Amino acid sequence: MATLLVNGRIHGGSATAMAVAGGLVAWLGGDDEGRARFPDAAVVDVAGGFVAPAFVDAHVHVTSSGLLLAGLDLTGCRSLAECLAALRGFVTSRTTTGVVWGHGWDETAWPEGRPPTRAEVDAAAGDVPVYLSRVDVHSAVVSTALVALAPDARGDVGWSADGPISQHAHHHVRGAARAALTPVDRRAAQSAFLAHAASLGVAAVHECAGPDVSGTDDLTELLALAAAGGTPDVVGYWGERTDPAVAARLGAR
């Protein structure tokens, strides 16, 4: 049976109605003509809404984005003091254990003009492993407890004894934070992100995975979750200078 959308604004023209049959757009036109052409259709009144093709997000990191949905969002912090207060409140109020994942701080507009130090993060979070990525996701401030889980970070390129960690050292601490996640944690984060993307009209995402971004387990579990059905579809890519057979084995491109 066809579905007839009426009372809308259809992308690409002046139509207010659209009929869908067999998964395809079957017709565009006016409301009255649509009701006459498809008298047995299931009618959906979109109440003036805009009807457009679904979106495709061509570069995502699903698990990391899902962790932000349930983690500490620092994108709205307007100062260093506000960032540290948000961390302190999150650690105090959370009901789970394990690594605290946060994202989005940007010191360039803060009155203090600098990011948090490790000592400040420790003072706010205690002995909890904390990973707080900058807005560009290429550096992070972390707690001493997390550094203890990533001993190889010390002295590597991008290491800082008290400030943000970047480059290879960042890969080590991010990997340690990721390793602390259980398969249940990953599944929850992935499901949360995919549901959020679908709610925004995203029908497909391109997961840009790699050894320093998410890991093989993360990618294979994500692709299995997507294959089980639902929306959006997931196209996986594996970014590493290696034998293409590695990517193929993971089900990626």
Image (spheres, rainbow, N blue to C red):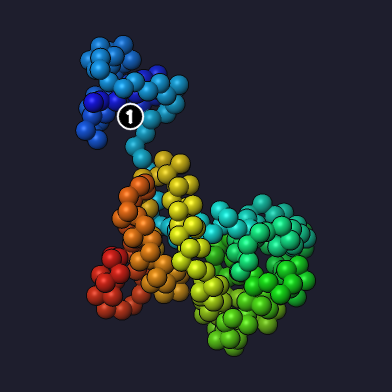
In this rendering, position of residue 150 left or right of residue 17: right
Residue 235 locus on image (x, y percent)? 32, 57
In this rendering, position of residue 18 left or right of residue 124: left
| Quadrant of the image occupied by residue 176 | bottom right
Residue 253 visible? The answer is yes
- Pointer 1: what residue? 12
Q: Nearer the viewer, residue 86 or 11?
A: 86
| Quadrant of the image occupied by residue 94 | bottom right
Residue 57 locus on image (x, y percent)? 40, 51
The residue sitting at 52% across, 69% down in the picture is: 181
Q: In which quarter of the image is the N terminus?
A: top left
Label 1 CA crowd tier, 10 Å (few <14, some 14–19, many 20+): few
Residue 168's place in the image compared with 41, above or below, is below
The residue sitting at 66% across, 51% down in the picture is: 76
Q: Nearer the viewer, residue 198 or 171?
A: 198
- Number of marks in the rendered image: 1
Q: Which of 14 and 196 is in front in this view?
A: 196
Q: Which amino acid type is shown beneath numbered disc 1?
A: Gly
The residue sitting at 23% across, 29% down in the picture is: 21
Residue 31 locus on image (x, y percent)? 33, 15
Secondary structure of the residue carrying tag 1 is loop
Residue 210 visible? The answer is no
The residue sitting at 63% across, 58% down in the picture is: 72
Residue 161 locus on image (x, y percent)? 68, 82
